Image (cartoon, rainbow, N blue to C red):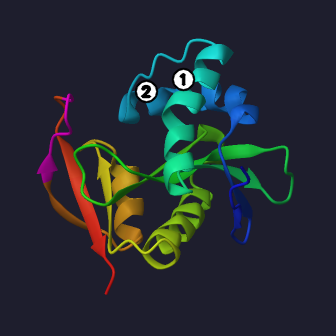
Amino acid sequence: MNYKMYQTERLILRPTDQSDASFIYELMNSEKWIKYIGERNIKSLDDAKTYIKEKMDPQLERLGFGNYTMILKSDESIKVGTCGLYDREGLEGLDIGFALLESFENLGYAYEAARKVLELGLQDFGYSKISAITTRDNVSSQKLIKKLGLRFIKMINLPNDEEELMLFEIQNA
């Protein structure tokens, strides 16, 4: 099935697929991913392919959207991060999430992609509320979430996770 790609000024947002396995392996094993998002036990290229197949593809097939690989328009061979909307257990509505390879941080890519994905969720996909979650110590993520217009609501715990997370939300007016 062909799923829709989106573009921003500098990025192509393409649904993550098996061709992204080596990129997903690299991203999910980065220091900040493990620190702020969590260890996913992606220890090989096959693990990355399985993760895409079992964790990303089902939502894409069910809802028509999910995790997007962020690709530079100026050089389509360069993947800089991921951004998406996730139907996450324990959260009402959708959760917006993003992650970048460290060498592409602080260049505005995460905001650019997240702003587009947020707009899609609230306007094109018809959701009235988008949430975001982050750890208390992930200050850069909190800044981006606030810049997108989400407001801090409360501290929460997701099912089967003991770490307390900050919950942010935005409602469609």
Q: Is residue 117 above or below residue 87?
A: below
| Secondary structure character of the magenta stretch overall | loop
Distance between the alpha carbons at the discs numbered 1 and 2: 6 Å
Label number found at residue 89: none
Residue 13 picture quarter = bottom right
Q: Residues within 10 Å of mark 1 (few under 14, many from 20)?
A: some
Q: Determine whether the residue tagged by mark 1 lies in a helix, strand or loop.
A: loop
Q: Determine whether the residue tagged by mark 2 lies in a helix, strand or loop.
A: helix
Q: Is residue 127 above or below residue 4?
A: below
The span shown in magenta is 155-161
Q: Are marks 1 and 2 in contact (CB under 8 Å)?
A: yes
Q: The residue under label 1 is which amino acid type? A: Asn
Does the stretch in magenta take in 158? yes
Which residue does the image show at 64% across and 24% down from the upper left?
A: 49
- Residue 144 placed where, x, y %? 42, 61
Label number found at residue 29: 1
- Residue 19 placed where, x, y %? 76, 34
Q: The residue under label 2 is which amino acid type? A: Ile
Label number found at residue 34: 2
